[in-house]
Image (cartoon, helix red, strand yellow):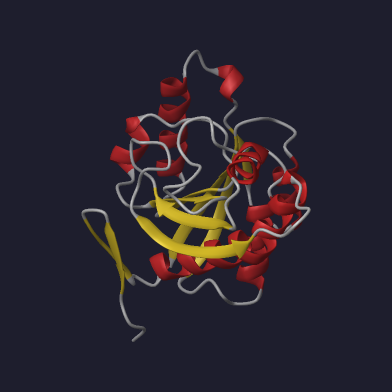
Amino acid sequence: MVRIAVLVSGGGTNLQALIDAQARGELKNAKIAAVLSSRDGAYALERARKAGIPGYVVARKDFPSNRDMTRALVARLRELDIGLVVLAGFLHILTEEMVQAYPNAILNVHPALIPSFCGAGYYGLRVHEAALAYGVKVTGATVHFVNEEPDGGPIVLQKAVDILPGDTPEVLQRRVMEQAEWVILPKAVSLFCEGRLSVEGRTVTIKEER
């Protein structure tokens, strides 16, 4: 059984998708063991409490740098015997100590089809604003492993979402969450915990179910 920690900063909609998937029995060989928030008062912590999942605060404001916060997170994750880290709306750049502690064991969901509209500065509504401004006809979401480059790790799953006439960033954001993020994030987490993902260079191979 792989113990999962979900790192959050805000409302926790992707966390809720994972909690719901776990309740439906869709996270195989997995248990959401902890939720760690970068700020006190994040609603994601309330979602964790309602689901009976221990919640912890490792607040960015309590540390002089991202590196110091990252080291504190790694220490807490090791205390909790975590096997997979999931970034679900975590709004801080983690330094290399996290990747070194959990190589190919950190998953992030990004609300675009990487390599489009990704990297430093592309988060939240900014991603959808950029997609609409560029005039693309299709966007979507990507689950990828985390490395030292923002949104630069090997891609696990992607799902496309059509852009429709009259879309606003807010409307598009909601559709991408409902049709893509909340679908592929639980699936990727389960694939990892089942031991069905292998990484070679930039390529992630999904093994057949036994």
Q: Position of residue 167 (x, y in %)?
A: 75, 52
Above or below: residue 30 compared with residue 106: below
Q: Is residue 15 left or right of residue 195?
A: right
Q: Residue furthest left?
A: 200
| Quarter containing the N terminus | bottom left
Can residue 46 be seen in the rendering of this structure?
no
Rendered residue at 52%/17% (across/down): 63
| Quarter containing the C terminus | bottom left
Can residue 66 be seen in the rendering of this structure?
yes
Q: Position of residue 191 (x, y in %)?
A: 42, 70
Dividing the picture into quadrants, the one containing residue 38 is top right
Rendered residue at 57%/50% (across/down): 111
Q: Position of residue 188 (x, y in %)?
A: 46, 65
94, 54: nearer the viewer: 94
111, 96: nearer the viewer: 111
Q: Is residue 126 left or right of residue 158?
A: right
